[in-house]
Image (tube, helix red, strand yellow):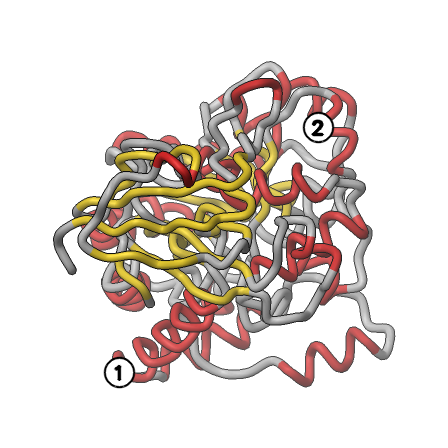
């Protein structure tokens, strides 16, 4: 990492996410920002900017915190483009294609899995994602879940053990035995490489009793709780996540009033994944309902080969504004500070003194352009840990 001080000045619009003055984005005009040793140490008016060893002139552009993608599946092999084409022709998404990816992933070499994860991580960084969570879930046996997490840990500290993605074909008639495997040898092999544990609590995957047992075992092993829930229909997953103190419950597409009330009365984040709805032609979550109830909302890509093969947080921001009734400011906050909350991180998702110097310079004067100009490559420059990428 390059040491010394770096000044980013001539910032037309600086999004700090400091929440002052009733503005969650904490927007500052005509601003500057000072970085030392990979950390933000000062922000303020450009006219008061201190001297620094190096300088980046933002040219009047907007500067935002790097995106925090708190839900992604990057360790896999194979391709499911034909499945996508079938859905576009009218087939319904059921989640069954996960097993196709499991077969390809088990057959792949470590180098192949590493290459795919690295390619996608690089795509994300180019599009402004400086923090990403990566799940396992395409191995579904002891050896392949452990190696998936070991590879994921080469790219992020936020790794999630998702051995309970679906029940693999060899256990189709013995789901209780598979839950025992997940809670026992698989968890023991995976835990050294994981920060979190996750379960796909959904019809066709794991019911509430199985999900509760798996998550409790993960908690006992020192892992934090996350949950896939209420994607395909109403179910018990959201309230189970809140009960267990999950950092985040993800998807949240089909919610009852009781689900919304539970989230609103908790510290659990509702992470919405509009790329999945786009790719499966499913109803979008009602973000407006959650926000109006006081729920903390995050946005993430759900990058995976089956139901959301996008690595673009700007695309998800645009979808959230157009399809989920979020304002541009709400969507940007959810894609930065919201993602940090979903990972229980305080060092990212903001540009205030003490934060990690992860930032993006837009080729635009305002954060509004992320939704206003969808599909346009607006990320001019990325700094990760204070280093230009």
Residue 102: x %, y % from top left: 46, 72
Q: Residue sitting at 78 percent across and 22 percent down?
A: 257
Distance between the alpha carbons at the discs numbered 2 and 1? 42 Å
Let me know if residue 133 appears in the view: no
Near-viewer residue (372 or 305): 372
Residue at far right of view? 90
Q: Is residue 191 above or below residue 57?
A: above
Q: Quadrant of the N terminus?
A: bottom left
Q: Quadrant of the C terminus?
A: bottom left
Q: Residue sitting at 40 percent across and 63 percent down?
A: 140
Mark 2 lies on residue: 291
Query: Helix, strand or loop at disc 2?
Result: helix
Give residue 111's mark. Answer: 1
Which image quadrant is residue 326 in?
Answer: top right
Q: Residue sitting at 41 percent across and 35 percent down?
A: 225
Near-viewer residue (325 or 276): 325
Mark 2 is surrounded, within 10 Å at the Cα level, by few (under 14), some (14 to 19) or many (20 or more) other residues, namely some
Is 296 left or right of 134, judged from the image as shown? Answer: right
């Amino acid at each position: 990492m390059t040491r010394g001080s770096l000044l980013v000045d001539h910032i037309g619009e600086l999004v700090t996410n400091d929440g002052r003055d009733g503005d969650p984005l904490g927007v500052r005009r005509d601003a500057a920002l000072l970085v030392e040793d990979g950390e933000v140490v000062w922000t303020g008016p450009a006219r008061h900017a201190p001297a620094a060893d190096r300088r980046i002139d933002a040219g009047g552009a907007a500067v935002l915190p790097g995106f925090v993608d708190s839900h992604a599946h990057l360790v896999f092999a194979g391709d499911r483009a034909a499945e996508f084409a079938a859905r576009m022709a009218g087939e319904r998404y059921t989640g069954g294609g996960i097993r196709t990816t499991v077969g390809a992933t088990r057959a792949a070499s470590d180098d192949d899995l590493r290459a795919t994860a690295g390619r996608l991580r690089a795509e994300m960084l180019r599009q402004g994602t400086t923090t990403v969570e990566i799940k396992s879930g395409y191995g579904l046996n002891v050896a392949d879940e452990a190696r998936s997490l070991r590879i994921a840990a080469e790219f992020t500290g936020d790794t999630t053990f998702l051995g309970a993605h679906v029940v693999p074909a060899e256990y189709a008639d013995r789901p209780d035995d598979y839950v025992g495997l997940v809670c026992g040898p698989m968890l023991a092999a995976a835990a050294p490489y994981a920060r979190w544990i996750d379960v796909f609590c959904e019809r066709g995957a794991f019911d509430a009793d199985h999900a509760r047992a798996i998550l409790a075992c993960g908690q006992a092993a020192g892992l934090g709780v996350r949950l896939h829930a209420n994607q395909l229909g109403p179910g018990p997953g959201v309230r189970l996540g809140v009960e267990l103190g999950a950092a985040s419950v993800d998807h949240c597409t089909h919610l009852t009033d009781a689900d919304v009330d539970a989230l609103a009365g908790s510290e659990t984040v509702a992470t919405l994944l509009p790329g999945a709805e786009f790719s499966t032609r499913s109803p979008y979550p009602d973000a407006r309902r959650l926000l109006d109830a006081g729920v903390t909302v995050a946005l993430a890509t759900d990058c995976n080969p089956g139901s959301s093969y996008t690595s673009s947080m700007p695309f998800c921001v645009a979808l959230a504004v157009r399809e989920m009734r979020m304002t541009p400011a709400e969507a940007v906050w959810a894609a930065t500070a919201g993602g940090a909350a979903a990972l229980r991180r305080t060092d990212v998702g903001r540009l205030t003194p003490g934060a990690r110097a992860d930032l993006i310079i837009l080729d635009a004067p305002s954060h509004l352009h992320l939704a206003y100009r969808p599909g346009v490559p607006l990320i001019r420059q990325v700094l990760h840990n204070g280093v230009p990428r």
